[in-house]
Image: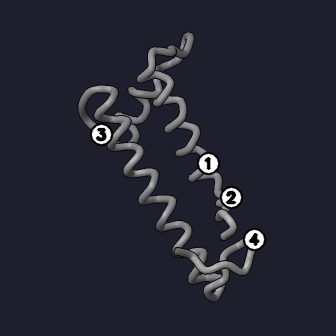
Amino acid sequence: MKKLIINAPYLTRLAILRGALKLEVLGMKRSRTPTVYSLVKKEFGFKGSKQSVLDQFCTFYEVQKRDYAERHYIANGGIVPGGNHALH
């Protein structure tokens, strides 16, 4: 089965934020800018420790990605963009 590639600026931004937040949880820091942790908490309203916010954000990202894929699947008449494979 071919992997579904999603090309949407919103989901791309979420994926970048998720990756940066994972790095912050591991101890990396951004210089001279607000932390991704604070940006995600402020923008999405999550509360808790860095690990807790990461877990909430990963769940949020997966839901957004699945919803986007389902909308595209339906809008394309059941055809997954980039191939003729069914969405599972």
Give the number of the disc on residue 82: 4
Q: Amino acid at mark 4?
A: Gly
Mark closer to the chain start, 3 or 2: 2
Give the structural element (helix, strand or loop) at label 4: loop
Mark closer to the chain start, 4 or 2: 2
Write down the residue under mark 3: 46
Q: CA distance from mark 1 to mark 4?
A: 17 Å
Q: Residues within 10 Å of mark 2 (few under 14, many from 20)?
A: few
Q: CA distance from mark 4 to mark 2?
A: 11 Å
Q: Position of residue 51 (x, y in %)?
A: 32, 30
The quarter of the displayed image where residue 79 is located: bottom right
Q: Position of residue 28 (x, y in %)?
A: 51, 15
Q: Position of residue 45 (x, y in %)?
A: 31, 41
Q: CA distance from mark 1 to mark 3?
A: 20 Å
Q: Amino acid at mark 1?
A: Thr
Q: Amino acid at mark 2?
A: Asn
Mark closer to the chain start, 1 or 4: 1
Asked if labels 2 and 1 touch by Cβ distance under 8 angstroms, the answer is yes
Q: Position of residue 29 (x, y in %)?
A: 51, 14
Give the number of the disc on residue 51: none
Q: How is the image coloured?
A: one colour
Q: Residue at x 54, y 34 (%)?
A: 19
The residue lying furthest to the right in this view is 82
Q: Nearer the viewer, mark 1 or mark 4?
A: 4
Considering only vertical position in the picture, is 18 above or below 2? above
Considering only vertical position in the picture, is 43 above or below 29? below
Write down the residue under mark 2: 7
Q: CA distance from mark 4 to mark 3?
A: 34 Å
Write down the residue under mark 1: 12
Asked if labels 3 and 4 touch by Cβ distance under 8 angstroms, the answer is no
Considering only vertical position in the picture, is 18 above or below 67? above
Give the structural element (helix, strand or loop) at label 1: helix
